Amino acid sequence: QVQVVESGGDLVQPGGSLRLSCAASGIRFSINAMGWYRQAPGKQRELVAIITSGGAANYADSVKGRFTISRDSAAKNTVLLQMNSLKPEDTAVYYCKVVLVRYDVWGQGTQVTVSS
């Protein structure tokens, strides 16, 4: 059974940094991509960043230059999201999605709150 677990969410002041981690286990087939999405209260879930198995990354315009997605070289099937220069509008539940050949698997989410 595929499991996706996010960690690293926290309360941080504006201008601060956080690093989120997403670990997938129970994977029997190749992962096509892993991505981070977020959902703020009253808003739709939106793509933040995604990285393919080949290493290509795409970002939402709102986070370009501030967030970096990468694969964890020390842990298999794990991606990181480094978030710098955080803003109050980055406050949301951040979800990780694993894109497999036939279906996607979502994690339960981790809360990021940016507030003074």
Image (spheres, rainbow, N blue to C red):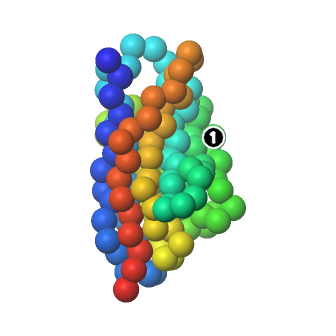
Q: Is residue 99 left or right of residue 5?
A: right
Residue identifier under label 1: 56
On the question of residue 38 being in view, the answer is yes
Disc 1 marks which amino acid? Answer: Ala
Residue drawn at x 35%, y 53% is: 110
Camera-nearest residue between 75 and 15: 15
Rendered position, 52 above or below 45: above
Q: Residues within 10 Å of mark 1 (few under 14, many from 20)?
A: few
Residue 36 versus residue 55 in the image, above or below: below
- Residue extending farthest to the right is 61
Q: Position of residue 5 (x, y in %)?
A: 32, 39
Nearer to me, 45 or 65? 45
| Residue at figure coordinates x 44%, y 35% from the top left | 106
Residue 35 on image: x %, y %: 52, 42
Q: Which one is in front, 56 or 62?
A: 62
The quadrant of the picture occupied by the C terminus is bottom left
**Which residue lies at the image location 65% right of the left edge and 48% below the top edge?**
58
The location of residue 36, given as percent across then percent down, is: 50, 47
